[in-house]
Image (cartoon, rainbow, N blue to C red):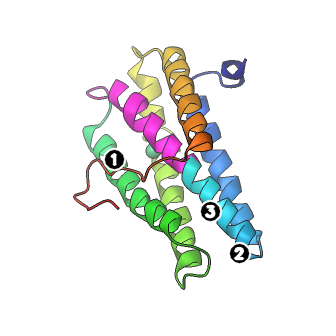
Amino acid sequence: MADQEYSDAIALLKAGHRKVEELFEQFENASGSGARQKLAHRICVELKIHTAIEEEIFYPAFEGKIEEDLLREAYVEHDGAKVLINDIEAGGPDDDYYDAKVKVLSEEIKHHVHEEEMPSEGMFAQCRKAGDVDLVALRDAMLARKEELMAQAEAEGLPPAQPRALNVATA
Ligand SMILES: [Fe+2]
Ligand SMILES: [Fe+2]
């Protein structure tokens, strides 16, 4: 069973972070525009799904239970990433700024992951301290949604990521 792989919701999200870090590293080492585009697409799909399960399920569960500023900033950071994700997905490796966009996306994600995983004051540390949230039930809800989105990505592709906090036009 897939849900046995992750002890709880936070373990699932951390595994998602590691996965995307690995894909960014592969992108950096890849040569050839076909391979780079494929990897960039996988990164974008992973991030769309990761931000969706956090925004739809994980973050709302901690509303009012952890620092409000931290949650708000997380939504804004996600939105910044979504602007780049949609742009990368709309373009291709022959664009002058393609590699720069993927690089900046990786830096933004690195910062955001740090905010989530930072020991003691980070978001996940605060979530663990919040205590009264069932992290195993959250894991199951997120896994179910993740599977649904993965199937959609596979079948018809995911639509552009929708910003929640930023007032930007979406393609
Ligand atoms: Fe995350
Ligand atoms: Fe996040």
Residue nearer the viewer, 169 or 84: 169
- Percent across and percent down for residue 11 are 61, 30
Mark closer to the observer (2, 1): 2
**Mark 1 lies on residue:** 75
Q: Which residue is mark 2?
A: 33
Mark 3 Cα shell of 10 Å, populated few (<14), some (14-19), many (≥20): many
* Label 3 to label 2: alpha-carbon separation: 10 Å
Q: What x and y, as percent, mark residue 105?
A: 51, 64
Give the vertical position of 104 relative to 108 (above or below).
Answer: below
Q: Residue at x 41, y 51 (%)?
A: 161
Q: Quadrant of the C terminus?
A: bottom left
Dot 2 amino acid type = Ser
Residue identifier under label 3: 40
Determine the CA span between mark 3 and mark 1.
22 Å
Q: Nearer the observer, disc 3 or disc 1?
A: 3
Residue shown at 55% from the left, 81% from the top: 95
